[in-house]
Amino acid sequence: ADDDKATRRLERWMGCALAAGCEGLMCKRLEAPYTPSSGPSRSAVWGKLKKDYVSGLGDTFDLVPIGGWQGSGRKKEWISPWLVACVDPDSGTLQSVCRVMSGFTDEFYRENTRLYLGRNSVLDSCTDETDDDAGKGGECGHRGGLQAQERPPNVETDEAPKFWFTPREVWEIGGA
């Protein structure tokens, strides 16, 4: 009951902050002294709550995956980051917007690497970790899924991902 009451109060304060044109709320633990931050470092006593962090409140964009790179560390077998694009209504071309790589589950990475590359892992049948063909996506000698031989002709970008994809899906991407 106390958690529900606290949640309702926080939602009400958040609504007031957003209605006033603020980005969100800064919250401090009650027992902690007031000590303003002296830079971008994170704090164990201060927390930031923005509308983008709350499901259903943040802005989203409809973007098309057009390319990707091999992940590193925990994500080394999957595509990460993904290069996404939006449609230019005047020209009909896809213009790259950004790379996205956080906020996805491991299952998302697994399923979409399989869908886009036609294999379970970026590492499957790959022995050369370097990009020796200037981002044309041919270093593994393997095609499948939605992988394209080279940048699709309707895509405009200065990026050179390891893998190019045939634009087929639209993803709803949230930003913070």
Image (cartoon, rainbow, N blue to C red):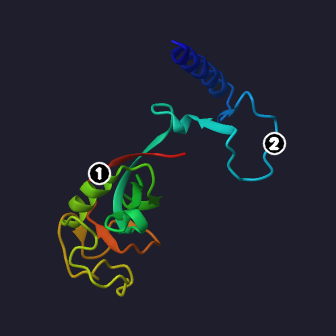
Please indicate, yes or no, whether residue 44 appears anywhere in the rendered image: yes
Expressed as whole percent of the image width and height from the top left, the position of residue 105 reads: 36, 49
Expressed as whole percent of the image width and height from the top left, the position of residue 104 reads: 39, 50
Res 136 → quadrant: bottom left
Residue at image position (76%, 33%) is 32
Does the residue at mark 1 contact the one at mark 2 (Cβ under 8 Å)? no
Rate crowding at label 2 as few (under 14), some (14 to 19) or many (20 or more) other CA atoms within 10 Å: few
The residue furthest bottom is 132
Question: What's the amino acid at mark 2?
Answer: Pro
| N-terminal-most mark, 1 or 2 | 2
Residue at image position (59%, 36%) is 50
- Please tell me which residue lies in front, 111 or 18: 111
Q: Which residue is mark 2?
A: 36
Looking at the image, is 65 positioned above or below residue 6? Answer: below
Question: What's the amino acid at mark 1?
Answer: Glu
Q: CA distance from mark 1 to mark 2?
A: 39 Å
In-image side of 140 versus 60 (left or right): left
Expressed as whole percent of the image width and height from the top left, the position of residue 80 reads: 39, 63
Rate crowding at label 1 as few (under 14), some (14 to 19) or many (20 or more) other CA atoms within 10 Å: few
Residue at image position (73%, 27%) is 30
Expressed as whole percent of the image width and height from the top left, the position of residue 92 reads: 36, 57
Looking at the image, is 175 positioned above or below residue 153? Answer: above
The C terminus sits in image quarter: top right
Label 2: which secondary element: loop
Q: Which residue is mark 1?
A: 107
Res 33 → quadrant: top right
Label 1: which secondary element: helix
Please indicate, yes or no, whether residue 152 appears anywhere in the rendered image: no
Residue at image position (32%, 49%) is 170
Q: Which mark is residue 85?
A: none
Q: How many marks?
A: 2
